[in-house]
Image (cartoon, rainbow, N blue to C red):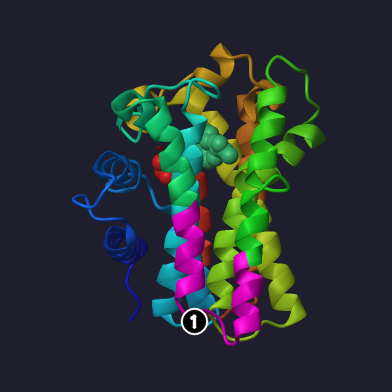
Amino acid sequence: MTSDFLTWSTALQARTEIVLEQHLPALASAPQTLHQAMRYAVLEGGKRVRPLLAFAAGEACHADPAQVEIVACAVELIHAYSLVHDDMPCMDDDVLRRGKPTCHVEFGEATALLVGDSLQSLAFELLSSNPLGKTPAQQIAMIKLLAQASGSRGMAGGQAIDLASVGVALTLPELEFMHIHKTGALIRAAVLLGAYCGEPLSEQQHAGLDRYAKCAGLAFQVVDDILDAEAPTATLGKTAGKDAEHNKPTYVSLMGITEAKAFARELHRDALDAVDGFDHGQRLRELADFIVQRSF
Ligand code: GRG
């Protein structure tokens, strides 16, 4: 019998924590402050949605969990780096993340910058120093996938568009373009990297996973915008209401809250449809449910 979603996700969040802990530099190793700050930014925090997506896609594709945990942690390290940099005064300038002071508040801006740089490097060290996929060529393709998803044609590019969009009246397609890069690229990488640890995919399966990732990633962002508008800071563990305060274009500001909720439901349905053909896609379906139903 398969376990329920809560049992499954709690076990894999704990697994993720252990693997991250093992691969982060030890507290006692020099330079100690940088290593302490890296551990502060990564450990004991966050929903671990991207690792869970990698594990779920891995399960759908009969992957070896020992490989999936490496890609899951690599993606989470990139995500953690992006949050540290995003919170800095030169970007979003925030003081609260994952229910505690942001990395630069706790350790200073220079250290926070180095934390982001070092977490990014560590992600690629993980991907390149553990056997992944079926062949060395496939492993290199997986490393390239994460590099592209993180860089200027992926997450960092989306962030650049975001920074340039403050106070600008974006259209819905422009907003979607930004989020497909800023949030969606890394979510897509999590899904595909988890899947690539498994059996070879047919073209149809690949397209299905890609569509799932696109819909789940956008739904994640729409719900993020709704929560920013509706949920209290204490529940979110980060400052609520910042989008409106900073005059940022969001799904809520462009569509209104009712339409944004309907759009999230539509994306949820599309995500479920996309992985309909996967016999072992139960966790992907449950994660799509979680992404739209979450309250933090
Ligand atoms: C600085 C290169 C660079 C990129 C930053 C991800 C990102 C790009 C900025 C984060 C800002 C933000 C609030 C984006 C909206 C969606 C999002 C990524 C939220 C945070 O992710 P969660 O909810 O966070 O998965 P936890 O803490 O649960 O891991």
Instruction: Judge whether 159 appears above or below 130 on screen.
Output: above
Locate residue 237 relative to residue 210 in the image: left or right: left
Total of numbered circles in the picture?
A: 1
Q: Secondary structure at mark 1?
A: loop
Q: Residues within 10 Å of mark 1 (few under 14, many from 20)?
A: many
Q: Quadrant of residue 203?
A: bottom right
Residue at image location 65% in from the left, 63% down from the top: 145
What secondary structure do most residues of the magenta stretch adopt? Answer: helix
Residue stretch in magenta: 121-143
State yes or no: residue 127 in magenta: yes
Q: Which residue is mark 1?
A: 63
Looking at the image, the residue that sits furthest to the front is 30
Residue at image location 70% in from the left, 44% down from the top: 152
State yes or no: residue 78 in magenta: no
Locate residue 117 relative to residue 251 in the image: left or right: left
Q: Position of residue 210 (x, y in %)?
A: 69, 64
Locate residue 6 relative to residue 88 in the image: left or right: left
Residue at image location 32% in from the left, 41% down from the top: 34
Q: Quadrant of residue 164?
A: top right
Asked if residue 285 shows in the view, the reply is yes
